[in-house]
Image: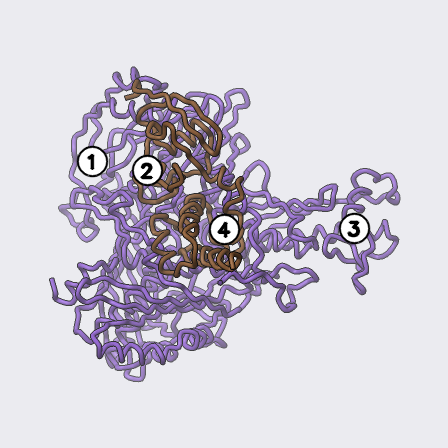
Chain colours: A brown, B purple
Amino acid sequence: MSDMRCDIELTVNGETVMETVEARTTLVDFLRETLALTGSHVGCEHGVCGACTVRVDGAIVRGCLMLAAQCNGAKVETIEGVSDSGQIADLQSAFERRNALQCGFCTPGMLLTAQELLSNGGVPSRETIREHISGNYCRCTGYQAIVDAIEAVAQARAGGRK
Amino acid sequence: MKIVEDSPPVLTALDRPNSYIGRSVPRPNLARLAQGRAQFVTDVTLPRMAHVAFVRSPHAHARIKTIDATAAKKSPGVIAVVTGAELAKVITPWVGVLTHLKGIKSAPQHAIAVDRACWVGEAVCAVVARTRAEAEDGCEKVTVDYEELQAVTDPETALDAKTPVIHPDLGDNLTFERVHSAGDPDNGFAEADAVVEATFMFGRHTGVCNEPRAIVADWNEGEQRLTAYHATQAPHMMQNLFAKHLTLSEHQVRVVTKDVGGSFGIKVHTYADEMATVALSKLLKRPVKFVADRIESFVTDIHARDHRVKGRIGVKNDGTITAWEIDALSGIGPYSVYPRTSGIEANQIVNLTGGPYTCPNYKARARVVFQNKNVMCQYRAVGHPIATAVTEGLVELAAVKIGMDPLEIRRRNLIADDAHPSQGPSGIKFEALSHHASLAHLDSMMNYAGLRAEQAELRKQGIYRGIGFASFVEVTNPSAAFYGVGGAKISAQDGATVRLDATGAIFCHTGVSEQGQGAEAVIAQCVATSFGVPMEQVRVIMGDTDNTPYGGGTWASRAAGIGGEAAWQAGKALRGNVLAVAGSILQTTPDTLDVRNGAVVDAATGTERMPLHELARICYFRPDTLPAGVQSELVATRHYVPRAWAFSFTNGIQASYLEVDTDSGFVKLLKHWCIEDCGTVINPQLVDEQIRGGVVQGLGAALFEHCLYDQRGQLLNGNMADYLVPMAVEMPDIECGHVVTPTADSELGAKGAGEAGTAGAPGCVMNAINDALRPLNAKLLTDMPFTPDKILRALGKV
């Protein structure tokens, strides 16, 4: 296995990256180990927990179910880049004020998942919010605070557009 | 919109001007977590760091005949292949017993199995390589020749003569047994108008921390020192254990714990693979990293709650409970876990059963047996969910039997709020509880009468909803009675050191640690208030045995009540020191001054006399201008341990409202309520979120979570696709309420709040499901988790 290598070129958080990776390397391992972008986390490595959620070409994916080699030419965004861009500053602030994170391990993935829902616009129902984040496991909060924070941001963003 | 902005509360005895006690201030450490800028152990890399992966036993019980590492050693990137026998030269084995659990026994456990593997997943060989992937490649090339031995997997037959004894030196498979009798149980049952009995089964489950267990061990041969970056709840305990078993002195070991991705009791134990990792670092003289993958987590993270409890209750027609009896059996795996033992959960079941009620007639037996499955040990709310489900299940069955409302039977039997100090039937001592106030609060908060009417109405339409309750008591703020008296070097006391820096801000070093509960915020709130600075000027240092006072860490709901009190007292002491020197500078007596909002002020008027940064400037840079003989002391340390009570018991009551789909067997949780009395509430938002998170862990136990083993000891669902955990869509909104009965043992008066949710939720859901199905004459459901197939069977539909 280890002799199967690929050269890839992609953009990560707006920066061009050229690396040689083992074919078996997952996207999240590549981000964490090769690029030291440790904000994306590895929770289950089989696509259930959502801690490794990142964006590839604008859509959220499981970083553990995609290979780095599949990202040749792709545009990848991680929590570090999304944070620094300011596009989820209101959501992060709501999570902090509502204590919608405890240990914080699931939070980067949860925020990216929530932002995807919020970017559809409107104010989703609590049931819709719960449904949408049900691919992201949080052991600490019991989810209610997360739903509250997302709902509050949806309302604020909708209000802001009026 | 549910985000309530923080606002200062009404003044209480704890309040000083600009008090943070009782305020929902946001946690200072959240921004970096939300930006992906935390540092979990899984994120740590060091120069020359190698990675270890383990070859793990595929058998529940097997002799290890030979290990052939020839091919593995040649595998690309492999640095070393190490067997149990080889590693035993570096690290000594351990035995998980405590002297206060009379008669408990266990066998020596090695960091890597020597000669014999005793459960599926036990490490039998380590492969160290440049990367984790290469280490795993190496593991695949290790050939182990096993001779499979008969596995002991059923606790019910573990003590039978024909069952093999797992550790022949111990004589039998009995780990621990406790028998307790109080009052006159025989007479109690004799005078009952009705006796109800049931057997309750609890599915073995586990913590499923989102961040798996992780450690980076860095033995520096030049310094002769080990630094362990370790995701643990108890840094000083681990310092002691690493030193002891590597035959080092404690000052040769530093444990650093930064961010921890969930713990819930999972990360407070000694794990063989973590001990192996520190030993491998010492052996190889370089940093070694171990991160459990998810499959390893399922087969090696401690499991809990594998209990069968036969329970009996006697009741009179007027609702008076006359006697309790339980017989509990629990299978804990092949070893009692070190150093806290695997006898504590069974012991807690005996301690806590019947705890909220006045009936003193109580007979209990609990037996703990060895088996060839993964080890069991203490997980969030140790023993509470079992004791509470048994007690509350029996109480609601008794109510049904005599035709009494379930809240009414509780009103007639819960210990009166003015009857304290009091004790439970097992002899556990209660300083002050508020069962009746809590019940009354719940009754009105949930609109019980309204829900009953709705339930009756919906039944006419074939919709089956149920309401269930669970009163509970909760162990928090443990004194040395928990572990120290049994010989474990686990600190019950905790300390805080507060230092004024040269700009007037303060550092607070504390022995408690953070795994998401909000300990950092609570410590900052306490010290900011008692010293007198804005919270933004407090920096809390935790999780570093080189740099914090000796302490116990964070477990058993001790961080706020014990660590918070130490911080509160340290802040007061530093204020005294600051005022002493301020008095000299301002030529007045210290007792006319105070520290408020970052300045020395006139105590009577609040007028600012001198900002703290000016006082610090003088003390640090111009001490020559202080009067002769005046030496400023701008550091203060205080420690605290509860002394008056072995534990600070809290209490509360939960309710569940749910709907059972009688065609599919699925349960929909509609709403959940929890009233809790944790004494002084330091941060209401953090308390509520502890409750909610705890409730959901209990709901998982009630409905989904179960480590399924076959008869040969194979774990059948060791992954997150097959082992179900609560996800957002299945969970209800949870309403919290509080009654406040502070403990008089500390000035702060805070008790713990971390166990309450998990303690009550499973029993509550069990009662609600049975309440829902009662009109259908369904079989009683007492076998958790309540999966759809069990519900359909109870309904006679499959």
Point 30% across, 68% down: residue: B658
Amino acid type of the residue that numbered disc 4 sits on in the rendered structure: Leu
Task: Say which of B691 and B185 sits in front.
Answer: B691
Q: Which residue is mark 1?
A: B59
- Chain ID for label 4? A
Label 1 neighbour load within 10 Å: few <14, some 14-19, many 20+? many
Q: CA distance from mark 4 to mark 1?
A: 48 Å
Both marks 4 and 1 on one chain: no
Marks 2,1: beta carbons within 8 A: no
Determine which of the numbered discs, if any, sits on residue A45 in the image.
2
User: Is label 4 in a helix, a strand or a loop?
Assistant: helix
- Chain ID for label 1? B
Looking at the rendered image, the disc whose residue lies closer to the viewer, 3 or 2, is 2
In the image, taking residue B257 as reference, residue B159 lies left or right, namely: left
Q: Position of residue B311 (x, y in %)?
A: 26, 66
Label 4 neighbour load within 10 Å: few <14, some 14-19, many 20+? many
Question: Which callout, 1 or 3, points at the residue further toward the start of the chain?
Answer: 1
Looking at the rendered image, the disc whose residue lies closer to the viewer, 2 or 4, is 4
Q: Which residue is mark 4?
A: A91
Point 31% across, 41% down: residue: A47
How many marks overall?
A: 4
Both marks 3 and 2 on one chain: no
User: Is label 3 in a helix, a strand or a loop?
Assistant: strand
Point 15% across, 67% down: residue: B795
Label 2 neighbour load within 10 Å: few <14, some 14-19, many 20+? many
Q: CA distance from mark 1 to mark 3?
A: 68 Å
The C terminus of chain B - image quarter? bottom left
